Image (tube, grey):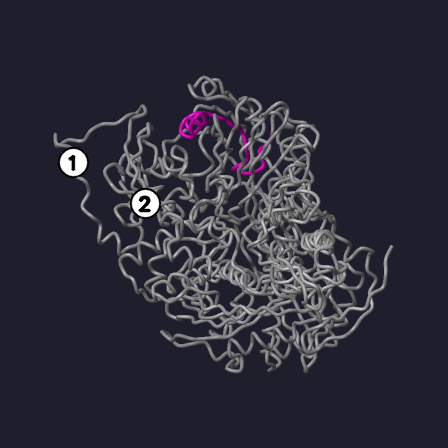
């Protein structure tokens, strides 16, 4: 059943009324005309004190009585058959309580249960060809071979040294271009080139014929590693057939479901908790091999086991952002109107698929003729996992670079070129974001690139990029709000706070509905035992999925509280309001405190549960954003310094301004790091990762920080009862493109490869040979 | 300095020569402690005097008793000599605020104060911390409250997932103890040995500067 309601959408100062279909039972919709007290303010994180004092317990901090320490032995070879594993000596080492070996042909396929709705499986199931062979085939250096649990971490490490593995070493390929050749060693029996993906609309050849200017170029991006600071890992305990797990995961429910599937036990027998998580960025969906191994070790050892990967393992076998080689051709009329975009790309996600990059080409601009051709290439390297806006930082780098090149060719301002090809949608806020971020950087100072600089010159440049990310939040998601007769308020959802501020956002919405302050709400999350489902925190879906359920639950609790208070205030519930910690008649004549009202409840606690409704039809445009960068390039050393980045974004209705600005800063910084520093380096002859640590895999630190101006705009595009959208991925999308454009603007030569390292700058300037 | 190659174990060893472990490194070169920041190395305090017999004493390889003074409390643990201060804090004494992130002196997540100066606890054997005063993140706040720096981190939202936060707080406190009014460049340089993957640096700078200015920390 559904009813029709009229709501106001748009931006402050530019709203319109629309009629929409709304599922029955939806509370009054927070739209552009709704003024709220707590939502949208800057609210300190509720878990701040726990985090600054070291009290917050992450998975890595869990200690259980009698707990053992697990460790994993990994293959040093990128491609090999396991002939045998002899673990007798390890099993006999005093202190060792369990040893597992994975030599059977199907052991790996069986271990890897990872699946997460909306994300590609990290490893294509059943590598064909392995079954015919005697032993298990290792597909990349770092794959799990055996595992132990022991009374101390040191003994567990010693035990690994005692395990003897005999391998038949097979030819391998880790280089992207080598892997495409017909004679390359095959990662899978069917070869290294799965079916390409082709998309688009119109006729690009006709589009290029109609163009006054055409640019084309090939752009490359490296494999990047997530490197969340807390590594993958879990603590598992079996008791009376029940499995309790504490896991470093972005999805407690997905993690649980993987274990349910593997051990073939009822979901009610498995509980997964993750109260605090030290970052994930897309690499921590599902139980994965690590999660299954720790539960297996605990089962075999008859004791709780903790297994946290070390940094080296984290960088071999837990995911990455695939590489890309993108050839892009863009045509436009003299006035900048796009006539055609053609993108042809290939990249490697290691032994998995997921190297697609066409999102930006398909989503960002209005263009009548678009063609995309994308090819995954298998290599004997660690599998990719979704990494914050999968495919988008890569795709935006090529597209936005080509647009800047086109603008320079046509003698147009790059910003004007983008505005010329603006894609109109309902309630879109991008035009305002362009203007605000451009003003913040001082875009009017931009000049077309000058001639290649003379030796020793320090040059400055300006560049920009657009961001977009779809609105993927949806049901199912459940929440409960409880009010105790002592006035205690609890908001419960099984979801996880991966550092984005989910806990605080749940409290903000509950507090808004109940007329309280956020710190008066206790939040319970990170626990499948709550029974309140949440999707995994990826794709910018967490708040968009759960907050509408939280709000409905809070509204239910509010109704029950008002009913209890009504007799004492001599007014019916619909004549009462909850504000500033008081229940009052609407005329303000009579009131009582929230605690007094709670004291009139007829039971010790009232509880309201709600589930998220589906998105309102016709609503739910992407989140948009625009970023501008100013850089300084030392043309004698090739060093690039980012001076300033302005970043305007929206997440529909802003929930917590403070945390949202932090999210923008964080996306910008992660992408700055990607643009200038990060790349996984593999040694082709040995097939191993050369920089699986935080010294050689360089991540931006305090010295690389530019000034960042985060700008949050509210856009009332109301697809749910709050109008909230996601903000996790958008800020990471355009930064590398904006920086590359700024560098190209500074030196007068187009940057076509990430990361933008000093040697590459010097090569572009003709000072050294191509690296 | 050339890195000691890890004892080659052929096929049974880990995946790459990059897999140098912190423990192998410590065992190989006998480093005592990793002071954070170049400025601190220059100000390295004198090491404790050698044993009276003038020679080195051999510990282990079995477990030995180690007495440590942590957050003004004396604690005794029995561990193998190869165990780092970080692992003793986390695994034996349940002081888990100090984080293990890279385990080889690259990220600052395990910063603790040793006689008031920040060091990487992953780069120091527990044995070498005997006789020193160790302050962990758990020892920064006064009873029933927060250190002004901790409050400033909360007020400025200088934390996201929070995993790097203890290391930053410890290092920043050491800075403010030495230099109560640092400027931005000084704050950056002092914290240069720390990594935050969520990208919270600008707000960490703001938080540290706000306390340095003795201004009242507030939501910006």
Position of the C terminus of chain A, as image quadrant, is bottom left
Looking at the picture, does residue A664 appear above or below residue A92? below
The picture places residue B170, in percent across and down from the top left corner, at: 36, 51
Which label sits on residue B135? 2
- Comparing B116 with A307, the one in front is B116
Asked where in the image residue A513 lies, by quadrant, the reply is bottom right
The magenta span reads: A137-161
Q: Residues within 10 Å of mark 1 (few under 14, many from 20)?
A: few
The circle on residue B50 is: 1
Query: The residue tagged with tag 2: helix, strand or loop?
Result: strand
Distance Cα–Cα, label 2 vs label 1: 24 Å
| SS state under label 1 | loop
Percent of width and height locating residue A385: 60, 47
Q: Is residue A638 visible?
A: yes
Whether A771 is drawn above or below B144: the answer is: below
Residue, x 68% and y 34% (percent of image)? Answer: A126
């Amino acid at each position: 059943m559904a009813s029709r309601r009229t709501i106001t959408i748009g931006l402050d100062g530019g709203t319109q009324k629309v009629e929409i279909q709304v599922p029955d039972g939806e509370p009054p919709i927070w739209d552009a005309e709704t003024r709220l007290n707590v939502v949208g303010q800057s609210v300190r994180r509720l878990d701040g004190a726990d985090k600054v004092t070291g009290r917050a317990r992450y998975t890595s901090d869990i200690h259980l009585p009698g707990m053992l320490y697990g460790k994993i032995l990994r293959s040093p070879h990128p491609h090999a058959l396991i002939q045998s594993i002899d673990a007798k000596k390890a099993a006999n080492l005093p202190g060792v309580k369990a040893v597992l070996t994975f030599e059977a042909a199907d052991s790996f396929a069986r271990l890897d249960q990872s699946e997460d709705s909306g994300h590609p499986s990290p490893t294509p199931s059943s590598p064909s060809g392995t079954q015919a062979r005697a032993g298990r085939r290792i597909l990349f250096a770092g794959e799990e071979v055996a595992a132990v649990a022991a009374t101390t971490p040191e003994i567990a490490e010693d035990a690994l040294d005692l395990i003897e593995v005999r391998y038949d070493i097979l030819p391998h390929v880790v280089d992207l271009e080598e892997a495409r050749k017909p004679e390359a060693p095959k990662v899978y029996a069917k070869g290294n080139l799965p079916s390409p993906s082709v998309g688009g609309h119109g006729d690009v050849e006709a589009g290029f014929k109609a163009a006054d200017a055409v640019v084309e170029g090939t752009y490359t991006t490296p494999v990047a590693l997530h490197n969340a600071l807390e590594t993958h890992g879990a603590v598992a305990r079996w008791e009376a057939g029940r499995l309790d797990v504490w896991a470093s995961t972005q999805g407690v429910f997905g993690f649980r479901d993987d274990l349910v599937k593997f051990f073939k036990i009822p979901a009610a027998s498995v509980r997964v908790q993750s109260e605090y998580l030290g970052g994930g960025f897309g690499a921590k969906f599902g139980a994965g091999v690590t999660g299954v191994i720790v539960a297996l070790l605990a089962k075999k050892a008859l004791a709780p086991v903790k297994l946290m990967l070390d940094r080296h393992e984290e960088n071999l076998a837990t995911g990455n952002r695939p590489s890309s080689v993108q050839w892009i051709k863009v045509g436009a009329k003299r006035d900048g109107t796009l006539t055609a975009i053609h993108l042809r790309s290939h990249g490697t996600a290691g032994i998995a698929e997921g190297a697609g990059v066409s999102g930006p080409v398909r989503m960002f601009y209005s263009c009548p003729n678009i063609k995309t051709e994308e090819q995954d290439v298998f290599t004997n390297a660690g599998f990719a996992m979704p990494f914050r806006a999968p495919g988008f930082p890569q795709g935006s780098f090529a597209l936005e670079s080509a647009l800047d090149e086109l603008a320079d060719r046509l003698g147009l301002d790059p910003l004007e070129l983008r505005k010329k090809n603006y894609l109109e949608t309902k309630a879109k806020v991008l035009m305002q974001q362009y203007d605000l971020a451009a003003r913040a950087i001082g875009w009017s100072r931009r000049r077309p690139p000058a001639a290649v600089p003379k030796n020793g010159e320090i040059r400055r440049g300006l560049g920009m990029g657009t961001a977009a990310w779809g609105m993927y939040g949806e049901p199912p998601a459940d929440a409960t709000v409880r009010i105790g007769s002592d006035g205690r308020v609890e908001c419960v959802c099984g979801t996880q706070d991966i550092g984005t501020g989910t806990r605080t956002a749940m409290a903000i919405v509950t507090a808004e509905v109940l007329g309280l302050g956020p710190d008066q709400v206790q939040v319970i999350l990170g626990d499948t035992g709550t029974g309140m489902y949440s999707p995994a925190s990826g794709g910018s879906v967490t708040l968009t999925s759960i907050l509408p359920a939280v709000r409905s639950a809070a509204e239910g609790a509010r109704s029950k509280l008002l009913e209890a208070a009504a007799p004492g205030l001599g007014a019916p519930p619909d004549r009462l309001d909850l504000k500033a910690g008081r229940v009052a008649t609407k005329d303000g004549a009579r009131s009582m405190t929230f605690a007094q009202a709670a004291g009139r409840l007829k039971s010790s606690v009232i509880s309201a549960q709600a589930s998220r409704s589906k998105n309102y039809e016709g609503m739910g445009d992407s989140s948009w954003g625009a970023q501008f960068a100013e850089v300084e390039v030392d043309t004698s050393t090739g060093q690039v310094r980012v001076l300033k980045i302005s970043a305007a974004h929206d997440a529909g209705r802003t929930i917590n301004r403070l945390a949202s600005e932090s999210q923008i800063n964080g996306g910008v910084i992660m992408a700055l790091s990607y643009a200038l520093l990060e790349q996984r380096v593999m040694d082709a002859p040995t097939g191993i990762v050369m920089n699986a640590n935080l010294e050689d895999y360089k991540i931006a630190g305090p010295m690389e920080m530019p000034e960042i101006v985060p700008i949050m705009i509210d856009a009332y595009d109301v697809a749910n009862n709050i109008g909230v959208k996601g903000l996790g991925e958008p800020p990471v999308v355009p930064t590398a493109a904006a920086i590359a454009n700024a560098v190209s603007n500074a030196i007068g030569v187009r940057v076509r490869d990430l990361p933008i390292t000093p040697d590459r700058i010097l090569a572009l300037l003709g000072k050294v040979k191509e690296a | 300095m050339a890195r000691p190659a890890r004892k080659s174990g052929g096929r049974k060893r880990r995946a790459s020569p990059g897999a140098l472990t912190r423990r192998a490194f410590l065992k190989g070169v006998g480093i005592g402690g990793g002071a954070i920041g170049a400025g601190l190395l220059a100000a390295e305090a004198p090491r404790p005097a050698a044993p009276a017999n003038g020679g080195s004493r051999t510990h282990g390889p079995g477990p030995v008793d180690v007495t440590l003074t942590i957050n003004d409390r004396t604690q005794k643990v029995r561990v193998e000599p190869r165990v780092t201060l970080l692992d003793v804090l986390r695994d034996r004494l349940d002081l888990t605020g100090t984080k293990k992130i890279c385990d080889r002196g690259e990220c600052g997540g395990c910063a603790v104060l040793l006689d008031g100066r920040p060091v990487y606890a992953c780069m120091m054997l527990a044995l070498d911390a005997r006789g020193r005063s160790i302050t962990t993140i758990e020892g920064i706040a006064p009873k029933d409250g927060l250190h002004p720096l901790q409050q400033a981190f909360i007020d400025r939202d200088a934390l996201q997932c929070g995993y790097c936060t203890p290391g930053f707080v410890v290092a920043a406190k050491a800075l403010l103890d030495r230099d109560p009014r640092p400027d931005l460049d000084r704050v950056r340089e002092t914290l240069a040995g720390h990594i935050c993957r969520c990208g919270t640096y600008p707000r960490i700078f703001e938080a540290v500067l706000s306390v340095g200015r003795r201004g009242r920390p507030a939501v910006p």
